[in-house]
Image (cartoon, rainbow, N blue to C red):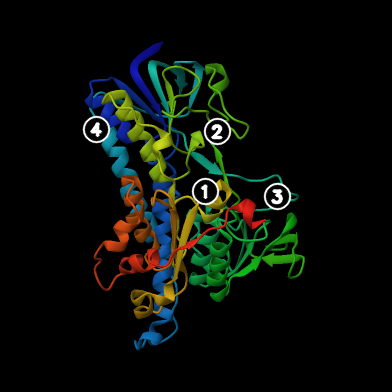
Amino acid sequence: MTTRFDAIIIGTGQAGPPLAARLTEAGMKTAIIERKLFGGTCVNVGCIPTKTLVASARAAHVARHAGDFGVRVDGRVEVDMVKVKARKDEIVRGSNEGIEGWLKSMDRLTVYEGHARFEGPHRVRVKGERLEAEKIFINVGGRATVPDMPGIADTPFLTNSGMMQVDFLPEHLAIVGGSYIGLEFAQMYRRFGSKVTVIEMSDRLIPREDPDISAEVKRILAAEGIKLRLNAKCIAVEKRGNGIAVVAECTDGPPEILASHLLMAVGRTANTDDLGLDKAGIATDARGYITVDDELKTSVPGVWAMGDCNGRGAFTHTSYNDYEIVAANLLDGGHRRLADRIPAYALYIDPPLGRAGQSEQEVRASGRKALVGTLAMSSVGRARERSETRGFMKILIDAESEKILGTAMLGIEGDEVAQSILGLMYAGASYKVIERAMYVHPTVSEYLPTLVGDLRKIRPAAAAR
């Protein structure tokens, strides 16, 4: 038996539910399929739960340092991990159940719970039922990558998903991977009270960032007692008694790290390997990401791929923007494109890193005439008032057009300040708009005119060599 729809959506992550709403409002008979958790990664094991845990960790950190502000806290600060997890679960549950309820109450939408597999370009099967539609939207997200390193098959380990079930305090958490996910968990669990060691193969943390940002993040984390093992080559793991041993040849430190628990945080993999894409003729790249054009169309006409599975962004906001592009082009007669999107994201350690546009490394490599401005957060009144002076601001300017090329805001409220720069970048405004604007005092943003008031030339990469 075959059930025909106007549209089928596979996955209920950030792009799926709003697209279902738009399609059904347009009168389309639509099916949406979810094999596990409504809301996808962000709601269940990503942004919402991790930032909820970050908030609990910050509360513990602030309580420990209350005396620095003249506030007396009697007794030792203790973290109840059962309550920490319960708070996280409650917040996640609200979002998860909200999305499920919204979808199941939507007119002209049929919700299927099960695993979808393609049987042809416009045909999928879920729980024995065959569904067909001229329009299919793939929104299946991704999962943690588990590298084939020596010993991993016989060693218990956690990923970002498994960490969501932890309701105890690991004595010593070893984290393989010194990038965004790994560093957020590192600071979080150090503040909860665990010993933490981060093991990174590169010679610096978050290697996609500029070296000055990597160096400052390293100082921030080391100051909180997090052990950092860089240049870790030939990493191997093994179960050792009730704990874990991680063997790594590093520039500094002993070759073996003994820990109670192991977190693998070395990247993400698209959930595309078990969809039967080959039967539909849907092309993927060497890493398993679905190949899409500038409008999110796949190699098969009438099939789109949105969110983490297309390799064009690994964030909640890029996934939602994918939905906006598809909906605008399909339903509103628009012509929106991925090429119009400015890269933007944040690293949620404390203080956070907010990023938009190009990095200094990318600007140098382009060979264009450019200017850079930097300002230490120790110069910012808001940072001094709160005794949170680590980090710095950076802005990159095209010397000829005066347009803003990129920004990095590592410091208190850096994620929010970067957003204000992002808006100017989309508007194509000159940096002189910042220079001449009046900002509210006392804020972090009020120092933006100071930041752009002391620009210096950037030497292109070729000239630097």
Q: CA distance from mark 4 to mark 3?
A: 44 Å
Q: Position of residue 412 (x, y in %)?
A: 39, 68
First reached walking from the N terminus: tag 4 or tag 2: 4
Q: CA distance from mark 1 to mark 4?
A: 53 Å
First reached walking from the N terminus: tag 2 or tag 1: 2
Q: Residue furthest top?
A: 1
Using the image, tell me which numbered label, if any, was put on residue 289: 2
Q: Position of residue 156 (x, y in %)?
A: 65, 53
Tag 1 residue: 368
Using the image, tell me which numbered label, if any, was put on residue 152: 3
User: Could you tell me which residue is drawn at 33 percent across and 75 percent down?
Assistant: 382
When the figure is inspected, residue 220 is found, relative to residue 151, above or below; the finding is: below
Tag 4 residue: 105
Which-is-in-front pick, marks 1 and 3? 1
First reached walking from the N terminus: tag 1 or tag 4: 4
Q: CA distance from mark 2 to mark 1?
A: 32 Å
Residue type (three-letter) at the residue carrying disc 3: Ile
Q: Position of residue 90 (x, y in %)?
A: 34, 55
Is residue 31 at least partly visible in the picture?
A: yes
Residue type (three-letter) at the residue carrying disc 4: Ser
